[in-house]
Amino acid sequence: MSEQTKTKEEWYDECVALQQGGDLGAAVGELKRLLEVYPDYGLAHMALAVFYQEKGDDEGTLGEMQRACELEQDDPFYFTAFSSLAIKCGNHELAEAALMKAQEARFEAQLRKMDELRKKDLKERVAESEASDAESADAASEND
C-alpha cells in the first residue's frame, strides 16, 4: 500500500507494528516519512518521541514531545506523556512544567464542558418559557 492510498492512521499503525516487531530503526524512518507528509499529526510526533527515548536520544525525545504538545494544546494526555518522557530523560524541571500544563488543560476542558452545559440549560429554559408564553397567549385568545 503506497503512502498515497493509505490513511495517516494506517501508516502510523504500520510504524508501530515495525517498532513492536523489533525494527526500531525502520519504525523511526517510517515515522519521519509520515511526518513529512502529515507534519501536524501530533500522535506521530508523540510516537517518534517514544521511539527516540527507546534509542536513548533525549534531545530528539523532548523535541518531538514539545512539537506534539504544541499541536495538541487542549489534550492533557500529551502533556502527561511529555512529563513521563521528560522524567525518563532526566529533565525533572521540564517534567513538572508539562504536568502543570496537563492539569491546566484538564481544568480548561472542564470549564468548557460546564459552559456547554450552562448554555444548553439556558436554551432549554428559554424554549420552555416561550412555549409557556405561547400557551398563555392561546388561552387568552380563546377567552376573548
Image (cartoon, rainbow, N blue to C red):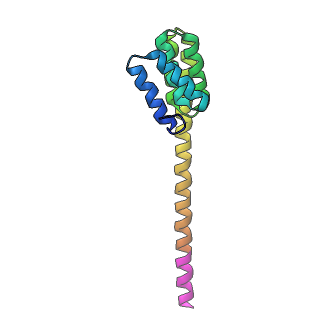
Instruction: Magenta stretch: give its range.
Output: 134-144
53, above or below 101, in the image: above
> Is 137 covered by the magenta stretch?
yes
- In the rendered image, residue 114, in percent from the top left (x then y), is placed at 53, 45
Q: Is residue 82 visible?
A: no
- In the rendered image, residue 113, in percent from the top left (x then y), is placed at 52, 44
- Residue 137 or 113: which is nearer the viewer? 113
In the picture as drawn, the residue positioned furthest to the bottom comes out as: 144
- In the rendered image, residue 93, in percent from the top left (x then y), is placed at 57, 12
- Residue 22 or 135: which is nearer the viewer? 22
- In the rendered image, residue 47, in percent from the top left (x then y), is placed at 49, 24
- Residue 89 or 114: which is nearer the viewer? 89
Quadrant housing residue 24? top left
Residue located at (52% from left, 35% from top): 8
124, above or below 7, in the image: below
122, above or below 19, in the image: below
Q: Is residue 109 visible?
A: yes
